[in-house]
Amino acid sequence: MTNPATSIPTTGIGARVLRKEDHRYITGAGRYTDDINRPGQSYAFFLRSPHAHANIRSIDTSAACIKGVLAIYTGADIAADKLGGLICGWMINSKDGTPMKAGAHPALAQGKVRYVGDHVAVIIADTLATARDAAEKIVVDYEVLPAVVDLATSTDTGAAVIHDVSENNVVYDWHLGDKGAVEAAFKRAAHITKIDLANNRLVPNAMEPRAAIGDYDRGEGAFTLYTTSQNPHVARLILSAFIGIAPENKLRVVAPDVGGGFGSKIFVYAEETICVWAAKKVGRPVKWVADRTEEFLCVAHGRDHLTHAEMAMNSDGKILAMRVKTRANLGAYLSTFSSAVPTYLYAPLLSGQYDIPAIYAEVEAVYTNTSPVDAYRGAGRPEATFVVERIVEVAARQLGQDPAKFRMKNFINKWPHQTPVIMMYDAGDYIGSMKRAQELADVKGFGKRKRESAKAGKLRGLGYSAYIEACGIAPSAAVGSLGAGVGLWESAEVRVNPVGTVEVLTGSHSHGQGHETTFAQLVSGRLGIPIEQVSIVHGDTDKVQMGMGTYGSRSGAVGMSAIVKALDKVEAKARKVAALCMEAAEGDIDFKDGKFTVKGTDKSMAFGEVALQAYVAHKFTGEQLEPGLKEGAFYDPTNFTFPAGVHICEVEIDPETGVTRVDRWAAVDDFGTIINPMIVEGQVHGGVAQGIGQALLEGTVYDENGQLLTASFMDYTMPRAADVPSFSLGFNTTPAPSNPLGIKGCGEAGAIAAPAAVINAITDALGHEEIAMPATPNAVWVAVQKMMTKMAAE
Amino acid sequence: MYPFTYHRATSARQAATLLGKAEDAKLLAGGQTLLPTMKQRLASPANLIDLCGVAELRGIELKGKTLVIGAMTTHAEVAASPLVAEKLPGLAALAGCIGDPHVRHKGTIGGSVANNDPAADYPAALLALGATIVTTKRKIAADEFFQGMFATSLEEGEVVTKIILPLAARFAYAKFRNPASRYALVGVAVAKKGSGVRVTVTGAGENGVFRWAAAEAALGARFHGRALDGLAVAAKGLNSDIHASADYRAHLIGVMAKRAVGAALGK
């Protein structure tokens, strides 16, 4: 048990080092994509579909060629250039073995638009205002088609067909687990709990909207794309190998400071593709910056599941089996990783922290005439946790058992543990985390607090969420066997300069996570040099050769492991240099606190001196040793990591207005080794805030015609400071056995854990289960009326 | 945003003259509604007359038994005014819960009143207090001024210069915020002057701010929250949208009215 408030080292691993990057972020010295301007830059504006589903009969741009317009391109132009479509990089096969039905996804619509905001044409002009003026003069003749919006009826006979490749709008009908074993277990069950859930669609809303600048160097024949990306190398790979912009050696992708992503900036979108493609055609740099409404309409949304789940238990309340049937909305097109989210990032987590002998999950993914849906903070794992933690809660209530005791009775308590759904959990202490969380939450005092609330006319409820996630994604061979188009290793290069300062080039990408601090802490601690002497370089394919980027809480577990491997090599080389300089055997060199010492002597050299000697190369010959001190490494994880924990939420409901106030929040998380507790706590705070947002506030609403009614902050409620309580956090650390630092990852945990905790607390307060997310005041008020009707009837 | 000609007025009279003369002109009185609308290209005035430099339109003073507030006085100034806090604390509280700090420091009472957004806060207060809206042409009673959603009795070329708010023995405003926009999902103002009570509702009505006669009668007989027990506004004619059904709004009107009475009584 590690208490974050005590025993604080001031440097290295475990230190609460203030974030090195924050000064530039908060004083306006950051360099975001929109801060970059290229000489001769022009501006792109996208004419977007006002209809959710329509055939394009014709596009007349003749009136739009006004002064200042450089070019107007439509789908016909990208077809003429044979530009490849946007891709979905994870192949999922249906139950019957047939591959998923991937409809074409051109960067500019070709003959048909499939959601409001779909890209019809791009206008490139001297100024943005001119481009917008021109867009208004383009005449598009649409044949409006019926829109498929409602997820529940999206595959019904008679529903409009969105992509010709799928006559019933089903992308795939996939399954995982042993159906026969589950059916057998249900037959001998003493009790079965059933539940229907909707996991509400969310709009990511990073603080910085997406942006891109395409630039073409005619002399070099080379492109540069500045873009708001979480993984510039993957973007380059896709733009180069699949879309066909240019070979990789002629395409540089730069993701400078990026103001949040939460998954939404993993993907390669139409806008950046068009900017970089068009830069060569117009012979000038092309810039595009989304306004907030464009982000609402066109950024990949998150979640959007409908699920029916059933759990079988024996007479003691021991879980025997679970079966889950989910329909997942993937929107109008398959976004970059969309197919993996409701399958391999979802169903393998349905065992939760529980010893469940048999699980069977079926997932039907469908097209609708809505924005594409893809990974959003947690990506599949919040959806799984919501299913597991709601059904476990309801089961405990139905059996009349204490929800915490019911959980602990069914918790896995031996590791490694092979679940029936792929995952091999390697380390944890679930009961320990539960007990500690109950102490932090003062569960014993809940009864008293509930009575006090009742005196004030309020309802109080307490909800648990014992989540688990698979992070540190991922072993390349394993994900390859499951359909991934890429490996999910990470790279690092450690460059020691002649005076002993260090640059670390990493394939991870920081868009707010604080890598410039945590990665530097690792290096500074390991080499015994001040943290100021360490710079972290990322986000530029011309500097970092290759990398897989940041998502899935992988930068610590995978990215830092690659740095450790490179540091191992740097230290080994430096030992050789030190041995040669001090005329000692290599085996006699000790390295500690930044000093190389010859065992049993007073001879020593500081790290910086060794670095200098490595470069001046006066003390050894070329036959003995290569000069220089620079090493690279690739790290491919051997397993996923399994962060897990228990979050306990306490809400107070005003039955008169239906307002739910989150009054208390306690969480005990096992993130494995923690590099910087301050940053980790910040990640939990932010994640829980997003989870509270999903549970109480954030509802994405399309009308029946596919118009997005929540297309601005006037109608889409983001969590604000006043919506979240003060958090009581604790850590219960068991190091991850699969990576050298023992890191599990922390970036998504809060968003994964929180929704179930909030809804379990609300349903505890209400005494019934009929409340959907977001539990808005109106919805809770309706639920309170039901509670009163129920109480009156009893 | 489309191009427009910007004018910076130096006096209310000059602004009114310009407003009458310039083609397709709009007043800029803080711009917290107009500018976002223009940015979305949903409004495209050819001429924009900015009132922010007109000193005579700012300020708060006590005149007899009224508070006189200049049209260009910001919500933040009303919220922070010691005079308002002393004479009409419910109004300071109302101004302090409009929008967010940015809106409160740019938005003005005159701009809010002239826009008459059906979910704005000030119209409820003005109607409850029986305020008078003073323009460059005349004085208009609040009862006449608010004419339905975004509609007022202002004529072409008329500029709101100040608001005269009669003091009330008891006045309070209870607001249930739209969780996203922070406008009033339902806002209820209650004012008691002598035996007369006014109860006004904003945010809920299809035609903007309205008076709740039954509540006024009940509170006129006994100024206490319990006097409202059993009273309900019909859901018919109330707004229903993704944030709140008409039924919920009808219910909230009762709850907010009681809370406003409680606040007016200092509870």
Image: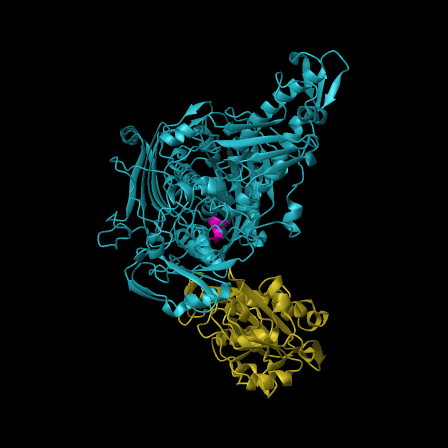
The vertical placement of A345 against A707, above or below, is above
The vertical placement of A443 against B46, above or below, is above
Question: Which residue is more in the foreground, A715 or A81?
Answer: A81
Question: Which residue is more in the foreground, A441 or A342?
Answer: A342
Give me the chain that's cyan: A
Magenta run includes residue B57 = no
Give how far across and how far down residue A29 sits, in percent: 65, 50
Give how far across and how far down residue B89 sits, in percent: 66, 69
Q: From this viewpoint, which residue is outermost toward the right?
A: A602
Give how far across and how far down residue A293 sits, in percent: 47, 59
- Residue bounds of the magenta highlight: A692-698
Q: Residue at x 49, y 80 (%)?
A: B147
Q: Report whether B166 appears left or right of A372.
A: right
Residue A317 visible (yes or no): no
Give how far across and how far down residue A791 sits, in percent: 41, 51
The quarter of the rendered structure image containing the N terminus of chain A is top right
